[in-house]
Amino acid sequence: MKPIIAPSLLSADFNNLGAEIRMLNNSGADWIHLDVMDGVFVPNISFGIPVIKSVRAISEKPLDTHLMIVQPERYIRAFKEAGSDMLTVHWEACTHLHRTVAQIREEDMLAGVALNPHTPVSGLEDIIQDVDLVLIMSVNPGFGGQKFIERSLRKISQLREMIERSGSNALIEVDGGVNTENIAEIVKAGADAVVAGNAVFKSQDPPATIELLKNS
Ligand code: DX5
Ligand code: ZN
């Protein structure tokens, strides 16, 4: 099975966002990954609801929104209204994760849970059957262009094993430091979807890189 490729707009040229989205529309990209950062949960601030609305207006691909914000439950409806198809919250940012996941599904979005590099997969044991997606962070969240943390490979396999054992339908998405060199081992470890920011947008030919990622 070819992996789902989700280019992260964080590494796009913000002066030419329309052109970047049209490029993705005409490419083999499966989803558009949108990194929302609040400067509190992570040490960086990116973009939010108005930008996602503008992306939605021209995107022909599903919008995969990754919330790196505290109290994400306050904004579930707002991100639905902005046009998100998938909404991922951080395990570390949710006191009542089960309720938050249910609320995302009630808004007819796929519900994702993201794990920081230090958060063990075992923390998902009691929620894995209720989520549509698990995002394994393979860098510390906050910035594009960081190096893939090798230990993430083990977490991906552990999660694959948990999903199979529990009968969950959750997809495994891997985010951070993915490139054409390491994607094969990431998929082999059990990933269904990969996010790629710098690898796509800083390459000479982004659509060709997306194809390469898909077929590596
Ligand atoms: C990091 C973000 C990632 C980031 C990935 O906090 O969640 O989605 O944009 O960028 P690369 O692929 O450059 O590591
Ligand atoms: Zn992300």
Image (cartoon, grey):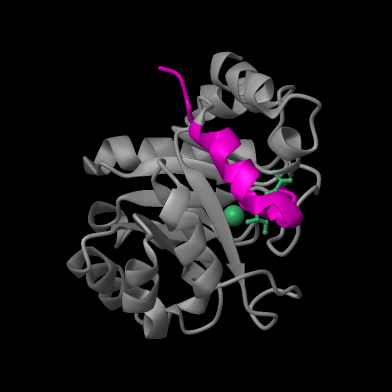
Is residue 108 visible in this depiction of the protein? yes
Horizontal side of 187 relative to 78 (left or right) equals right
Q: Answer with left or right where residue 179 lies relative to residue 145.
A: left
**Residue 175 screen position, x and y as percent:** 60, 46
**Residue 155 appears in the picture as rendered:** no
Residue 134 horizontal/vertical position (percent)? 43, 51
Q: Which residue is more in the foreground, 11 or 58?
A: 58
State the predominant SS element of the stretch in magenta.
Answer: helix
In the image, the segment drawn in magenta is 1-25
Q: Quadrant of ligand 2?
A: bottom right
Looking at the image, residue 144 sits to the left or right of residue 216; the answer is: right
Task: Where is residue 115? Give x, y as percent.
Answer: 53, 59
Q: Is residue 28 above or below residue 164?
A: above
Q: Residue at x 30, y 61 (%)?
A: 127
Who's the residue at 72% across and 56% down the image? 14
> What is the quadrant of residue 104 in the picture?
bottom left
Q: Nearer the viewer, residue 212 or 136?
A: 212
Q: Which sits in the foreground, 99 or 75?
A: 75
